[in-house]
């Protein structure tokens, strides 16, 4: 485990994190990154806005802060096709987001943009598979044209229904790669199974999609008591996300991509800012990062 400000030394892993879980403002996000001794941030929210929704002046200010601190962006955590976006929404809104992202990603020197496959409809309704594929093809083609790699995350979206749904996306959308979130399977039903559908198994999901993973998100939790409540988020290795086993397997297979923490232990990303104890968020973010470093060291 590293001390405050000491670089984490591992020939296997490049570490990053969603620092908007540590603080809303970028200056404090940078401080948290430096306290861990890390060099990368997974960019998502700054002062309550996604990085692609900042106005030009705010983005330029953020860029200057990052440059001055020597902090780089591991991934551009867009909200394109996210769990908050309906598949019936106007595609123009999505493509406008894509166009706002491209110059910013290029300026930041980032290679990966995170996307999703639009919100899940209630199970049993038409999930409009073909429309999802059509949209993701357009999104991926435009980013690819700009030299940017598109990676899909298995969140509360179509690709999160099961590993089989994710693999279907890969088959249908040329060039699409994967971000695997370790915790997301734990609180989602396996929609590839017959009723009563069990909770997904994070280890099995990981094994099924491993060959297409280029980026990892680390969160851990325990199965929720019912489908309509949040799971209990815990520190890495304390839940049902198989994090030590996944880390060990990544090292065994010479994984050389990023691993980004997304703790959720002090706050959930979509919780209202006024409900957050930011001091607690900051401290838990640091402790979460150190806990992950310990797991990596123990499995190296």
Image (tube, grey):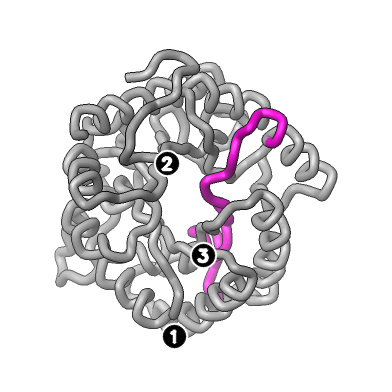
The residue located at (66%, 49%) in the rendering is 108
Q: Which quadrant of the view contains residue 174?
A: bottom left
Q: Which SS class for mark 1?
A: helix
Q: Kindly report which numbered mark, 1 or 3, lies closer to the viewer in this rendering.
A: 3
User: Badges 3 and 2: C-beta atoms under 8 Å apart?
Assistant: no
**Local SS, label 2:** strand
Instruction: Give the total of numbered labels.
Output: 3
* 228 relative position to 25: left or right: left
Q: Is residue 81 magenta?
A: yes
Which residue is at the front of the view, 34 or 120? 34
- Of badges 3 and 2, nearer the viewer stands 3
- Which range is magenta? 67-88
Instruction: Name the residue that disc number 2 marks.
Output: 260
Measured in 3D between alpha carbons, the distance from the residue under mark 3 to the one under mark 2, in whole angstroms, is 17 Å
How far apart are the alpha carbons under marks 1 and 2? 31 Å
**Relative to 2, residue 198 above or below:** below
**Residue located at (42% from left, 35% from top):** 264
Please give the label number shown on residue 64. Answer: none
Say which residue label 3 marks.
149
Q: Position of residue 35 (x, y in %)?
A: 51, 19
Residue, far front: 11
- Any mark on residue 130, and which? 1
Q: Tag 3, which secondary structure?
A: strand
Instruction: Classify residue 26 as left or right of residue 77.
Output: right
Camera sees residue 295: yes
Q: Nearer the viewer, residue 213 or 235?
A: 213
Whether the residues at callouts 1 and 3 have beta carbons within 8 Å, the answer is no
N-terminal-most mark, 1 or 2: 1
Q: Find residue 13 and report its horizontal and vertical position in percent.
A: 35, 40
**Label whose residue precedes the other's in the sequence (1 or 3):** 1
Q: Split into 4 quadrants, where in the image is the N terminus?
A: top left
Q: Quadrant of the C terminus?
A: top left
């Amino acid at each position: 485990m590293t001390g405050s400000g000491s670089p984490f030394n591992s020939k296997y892993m490049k570490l990053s994190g969603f620092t908007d879980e540590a603080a809303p403002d970028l200056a404090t996000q940078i401080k948290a990154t430096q306290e861990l001794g890390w060099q990368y941030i997974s960019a998502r929210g700054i002062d309550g806005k996604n990085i692609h929704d900042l106005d030009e002046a705010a983005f330029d200010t953020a860029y200057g802060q990052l440059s001055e601190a020597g902090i780089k962006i591991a991934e551009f955590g867009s909200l394109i096709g996210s769990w908050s976006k309906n598949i019936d929404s106007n595609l123009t809104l999505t493509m406008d987001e894509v166009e706002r992202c491209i110059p910013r990603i290029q300026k930041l020197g980032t290679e990966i943009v995170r996307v999703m496959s639009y919100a899940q409809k209630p199970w049993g309704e038409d999930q409009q598979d073909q429309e999802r594929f059509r949209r993701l093809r357009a999104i991926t083609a435009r980013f690819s044209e700009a030299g940017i790699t598109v990676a899909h995350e298995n969140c509360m979206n179509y690709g999160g229904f099961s590993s089989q749904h994710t693999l279907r996306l890969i088959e249908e959308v040329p060039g699409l790669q994967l971000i695997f979130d370790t915790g997301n399977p734990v609180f989602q039903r396996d929609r590839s199974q017959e009723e009563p559908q069990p909770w997904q198994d994070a280890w099995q999901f990981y094994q099924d999609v491993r060959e297409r993973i280029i980026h990892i998100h680390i969160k851990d939790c325990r199965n929720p008591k019912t489908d309509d409540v949040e799971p209990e988020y815990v520190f890495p290795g304390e839940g049902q996300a198989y994090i030590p086993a996944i880390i060990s397997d990544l090292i065994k297979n010479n994984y050389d991509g990023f691993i980004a923490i997304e703790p959720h232990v002090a706050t959930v990303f979509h919780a209202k800012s006024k409900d957050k104890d930011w001091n607690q968020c900051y401290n838990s973010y640091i402790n979460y990062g150190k806990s992950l470093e310990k797991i990596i060291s123990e499995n190296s």
